[in-house]
Each structure stands twice: as C-alpha cells, then as structure tokens.
Amino acid sequence: MKRITIRDVSERAGVSTAAVSYVLNGREGKVSPDTILKVRRAAEELNYIPDFSARSLANNKSKLIGVVIPQTEERKQLLLQNPFYSELICGIEARLRQSGYHMILSGVDKGEGYIDTSMQRNLDGAIIMGIYQESFYEDLKKAKMPIVLIDSYVYDSHFHVVGIDDELGGYLATKHFIDNGHTNIALVTGMIRKDGVVEKRFLGYKRALKEAGLFYHPDHVFEHSVTYEYGQEAARLIVTKYPEITAVFATSDLMAMGVLQGLRDEGKEVPEHVSVIGFDDISIARMCTPPLTTIMQDTVSRGIAAAERLLLAIENGSSDHPAEPAIMPLKLIERESVRNLSMNSDPIL
Amino acid sequence: MKRITIRDVSERAGVSTAAVSYVLNGREGKVSPDTILKVRRAAEELNYIPDFSARSLANNKSKLIGVVIPQTEERKQLLLQNPFYSELICGIEARLRQSGYHMILSGVDKGEGYIDTSMQRNLDGAIIMGIYQESFYEDLKKAKMPIVLIDSYVYDSHFHVVGIDDELGGYLATKHFIDNGHTNIALVTGMIRKDGVVEKRFLGYKRALKEAGLFYHPDHVFEHSVTYEYGQEAARLIVTKYPEITAVFATSDLMAMGVLQGLRDEGKEVPEHVSVIGFDDISIARMCTPPLTTIMQDTVSRGIAAAERLLLAIENGSSDHPAEPAIMPLKLIERESVRNLSMNSDPIL
DNA sequence: AATGTCCATTTAACCGGTTAACTATATGAT
DNA sequence: ATCATATAGTTAACCGGTTAAATGGACATT
C-alpha cells in the first residue's frame, strides 16, 4: 500500500511530472487540452491525493491557518467554555474548509512560543482572538504572514481587524437602561486592558451616562475576569453593598448569566428587582431564565468574515497593507431581563 | 530574512547536517558529547526552528492529529454549539500540545472526503467524536493510522475507544427518578442509532423501568435531534399530549435546557410540576434555572484521556491491536431539577 | 604489520512535490 | 529559405529535513 505520487500519475499518463503538476495546479497555457485530459484521467484512476508537506516544502505554502484563542493560565486549557469563541470557530472553520485550507487550533496564554508553531508549520496566516500582552503582537509581526485580529484593537499596519463597534455596543446597552428609567447602572466586566474590547465598551457606557447627565460612579464598575463565577460574585456584591443599583450591564453574556444566578442566590428577581443586559448574544443567551436582553453580534458571520479576509490577504500576498478594519453590525436584542421603571409603576413584588 | 535551516546550523557548528539531525532528535550513542554541545549551541544562537513539512516528508511523521466533530448538514458548520464538544476539545488540545503535536479541527457530516484530508496532511492519528454512517468508519480503517473514537460504539479491532458507561448513565438517571417516586418518565433524545451512545442510554432507561416493575411506554420516548430546540418542542408535546408524565430524562444537557424552557413556555414549573435530568454536566448545566440534575462525566478529562491514548498508540506504532475500551467514570449530580414525589406531600402549587 | 572492531562522523540518496530554464516543434514574418 | 516567436513539454535543481551506508581514525588482537 505505497502512497500514490505524482510520478505514478505521470507514468500512467505518459507525461512528465512537471506536466502533471501544471495540470493539477491549473497553470494557464502551459499544457494542451489533450494532456490535461490524460493527466486528469490518470489521477482519477489512481485516486491520486497530493501530499501537502511536499507541496509546502516546495512552494512555501502550507494551506494551514493558525487559529489562536486564549487559554486559562492554571490549567493550560482553551477558553472554549465561553461559547463566543466556539461560534467564531464554527464560522472560521467552515469558510477555510471551503477553500481547501485547514485550521490548527491552539491555546496561548502569554503568547510565548506561538511563533515557533507558526514557523514549524509554515502557517499561511493566522486568526488571533482575544487580547494578549504586547510582546505577542511583536512576535506576530515578525512572522511575516497575514494576520487577522478579532477582539483586540491593535491597529497596526501589520494586522487586519474584523471587529465590531464595541463603544457603540456599550453605549446602546447603557442607553437602553436609561431609556427604561434606570439611573444607577453597574458595569460588570473582565479586566479593562488597553486596546481591548472592554475598554471600548466601558467608554460607551460612560458616554451614555454623560449624555444623560448621569454621574459616573467608579464604585459601580466591577472589573475582574470574564467568567460566570465572577458575574455571580459581582451580583452578590451589588446586592449587599450597592442596593441603589437597579441595572447591570455585563460585558459578556457568560458574565451576565453569572449575574443572573448571583442575583437569584441573593433572593432578587430579574427583571423585577434588577435588570440585566449582556453582550454577544451567544446561543444560550436566549435559553437562560429570563431570556437575556443583550447586544447581538452575529458571531458566526464574524468568524466567516475573518476567514474570508485572511484568505484574501493570503491570495493577494498583501501581508503588508491591510485594508481598514471591517466593522460588523451590532444591535440590541430585547428579551426579558430588563424592566421599564419609568412607565411601569407596579409596586415591586 | 531567510529561513534558518539545518545546514546553517551544521556550518556554524562545524559538523555535517546528519550530526545536527542526530543531536536534535536525541539519537542515542550516535554522537559525542562534544558534538552535542557544539550543535546545541549553534542551534540556540541561530534560533533554529525545524520545518515540520520537511520532517514529515522525510520520515512520514507529521505530528498532526485530526480531530473530527459532526457538523450541521444545512449550514456546514461545526456542531460546536454543544459545549460538550468544546470541552472535549479543550482536553485534547492541552494534551496534544504538551507533546508537541498539533490539532487540525474539521467538521464532517457524511464523512465523505475526510480521508483526503488525512492523506494530504499525513495525519499521525485522529480523534473522532460523534457517530457517522458506516462508510466513514470503513474509510478510517483504510487510513492506517491510530484512531480514537469518542461517543460511538464501533468496537472494531481498528479503533481505540474512550467512552463512558452510557447504559449505566441511562440507568442511574431513570433510577433516580424512580427513587423519587416518579413512574411516568419520558426520554428525550437525539436519533437512536445503532452503535451510538444514546442507544445505550436508552437501554439503561429501559432496564431501570423493568427492574422497578414499571411499564415501558414507547410513546414516552421523544426522539429527534440533539438540539435545544427539539428539547423545547418535546416539552411542549409532553405537557399538551402526555400530562401524566412527571419526569423527563434528556440524553444531553443541551436538550435538557430546551426541555426546561419548553416546560416554562407551557406554564409548568421545574421541579414543582415536572422533574428533569440531563446528561454530560456541561458547564452551563449548573448555570441554568433551576440548576440541572444531570449525569456527570468529566468531559475535559475524557478529552485528555483520548489524546493520551492516541499518543501512546502512535508512539508504539500499534495501530492494529488497540487495548480494550477505556471507560471513564460517571455519576449522578443532584441539583435542583428533580422533585421527590414520595416523601414530599406538599400540594402542587 | 596486518586485521578486525568500535565509534563518531560524513556522504548522498531520498521523501513528493514545484518551477526556472531548457528543448523541440510548429507557426508566422520577412 | 531564414529567422523570430509562440507553444507544449521535459529536465533537473530545489525545498529542508532524515537516515542507510560509507568512511576514517583509534584501539585491540593476533
């Protein structure tokens, strides 16, 4: 059961290996229709499947894309428990496969060592989700391959960006609370890092407050990690220490779900006592109790868009001058986790 | 910025490329300590990173593992919305990376064409999650690489299996209902396919019923697709057509969450009116309302175990005679979605 | 001194493709 | 008839490693 090589095909077709290679790669005007036919037939009959390693070695194209997601520091595992990443990956994988590319999925925490992977595998490009320390981006630049960033605002001429208007998202959520008569609005969020998405959402939050003439209260910002558990903890804090708060904007649905649970643990009803808005509209947002009002981004489409962008850059060989950031649409989805305080004068249960 | 090759290292160290290769691959007794030192230093100084394509071409080892998960037929996207797969992948990725392997994640529906991927990339092995049509397994056998199956019972001498005792899981869930005084217990499940996991869970369900002297009622089995939406639909059916049912065993947490929502849509409370048990203990099982009683399997560990098993098979070159199936532990986690009918004589709200 | 062994090292073929450069033939222009 | 050009196909070097076989030197044996 030896492997069928291009030589086998060339012999069977009665031509040189070069001819076979030209036919199989669709080189224009290098081969006659007759030869094309012979080669196609021979390849078909032998069920020839090219070896990507050999191909990669010869022409320095691996058809391999690195996909990076954050990982937990302690357990060295992918942060895939946040469905946000899963959904992105669905989109990315589907689009890549469609063009004959494959995806190598890796977790990264500090970003050290990823450059090795990229070199070893001769990656044609990479999609980086999440935000990392500066040095990682420096390494990525050295890699000299097209790179698409999702969820970080490192606007550098080396990087393509497929983002959303996070500032607007933060604004819309906060505004929605204000429109519903809320004035004490908490923000529950992961670490606010420079160039990260939550920084922008935070900015939008502040803008909405300011625009409405509301006071920005730093104590009402609960900042830690993007986990269900922290959402829960923040909710407890809110109930016990800041009872004036009637609305919580969580910068990810996962945290929002934690907030929901935390409030419940403390005997508060949503939205009767406290209203909650999330971010992302991951699929479980509509499944929780009550269904979560959230800022929707079409995550799967965003994954597809990121892959598309990357493929384009690869095929153009334009790793240098990326187009300007693609900004995907965004909107607030009203479900049942927000109560209208102004109109509804029902007494609290 | 040319690539550093083994030749560069050999020149710098003043030895042949063969010597470098031997040192870097730790060939015993082929090189003197002196040479080892020189090579190590040179490689270090040049920051040499080997090219896996070249290596793969030369020794037919790619250090690449194929990881396959089902995909939706319509949209050609990975079934990653079920966190069960995400969690497995977390475990797999972590373990593979630890040993210098990388993972190519692909979606597959009918299984056609995957064999091509495997050939093109010279995969060293594969981990297959989910269940597929017969022909896919036939293809896999031809691939002549170690393969680990998760979630299918194709006990063939070609395949390694890292499973759980699904029959027991089904039994435990059903038994728990019975112990709590339930006698009309519905089963909500994806398609019951031969050699699939749900077939076994179904068997466990029937065994528990029989053991308790309860009548197995085929109408109480709701079988369709493993989705939140179907769980919801099944719940509606149950409430409207089979009001005698007081307990629902869903064979995946995702479906169980749909059931929860469907019951709520119909104005039923869980567990006051209807009790629910899920399967898998995905992370959101404890996050939903009420927290879901479920059959816990440590999914991440199972991913790790699968990877471990595969690596072992690869390193032994033993693609032929797999050890017997590894069966991971299982237990019922009691949360708040089951009501005890027998002891608790509170009137229904 | 000749021969055999061992050890460390090198040589060079090989993996399976791609592609620049070359050859051979046909076509067209002068 | 001669030369230039275009077209179709081939040759062989090359990508960056691995590894069987050959080499060469040191040492021991007869």
Image (cartoon, coloured by chain):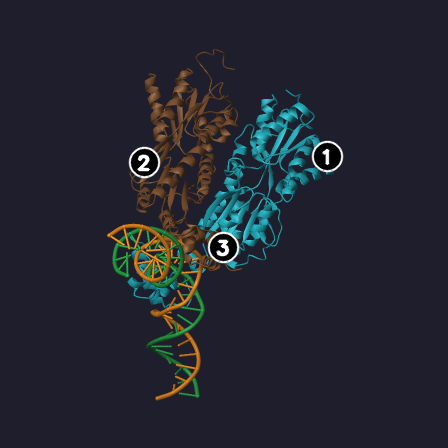
Chain colours: A brown, B cyan, C orange, D green
- Measured as percent of width and height from the top left, residue A322 is found at 31, 38
Q: Are marks 1 and 3 on the same chain?
A: no
Residue lying at 37% horizontally and 55% vertically, measured from the top left: A58
Q: Which residue is mark 3?
A: A42
Type of amino acid at the residue the image marks with label 3: Ala
How far is mark 3 from mark 2, CA to CA? 43 Å
Q: Is residue B28 visible?
A: yes
Type of amino acid at the residue the image marks with label 1: Tyr
In the displayed structure, B298 sits above or below B29; it is above
Closer to the eye: label 3 or 2? 3
The subunit letter for the residue under badge 3 reads A
Q: Which residue is mark 2?
A: A323
The subunit letter for the residue under badge 2 reads A
Type of amino acid at the residue the image marks with label 2: Ala
In the displayed structure, B13 sits above or below A71; it is below
Asked whether, in this view, residue B116 is left or right of residue A28, the answer is right
Q: Which residue is mark 1?
A: B216
Residue lying at 32% horizontally and 57% vertically, measured from the top left: B44
How far is mark 1 from mark 3, CA to CA? 58 Å
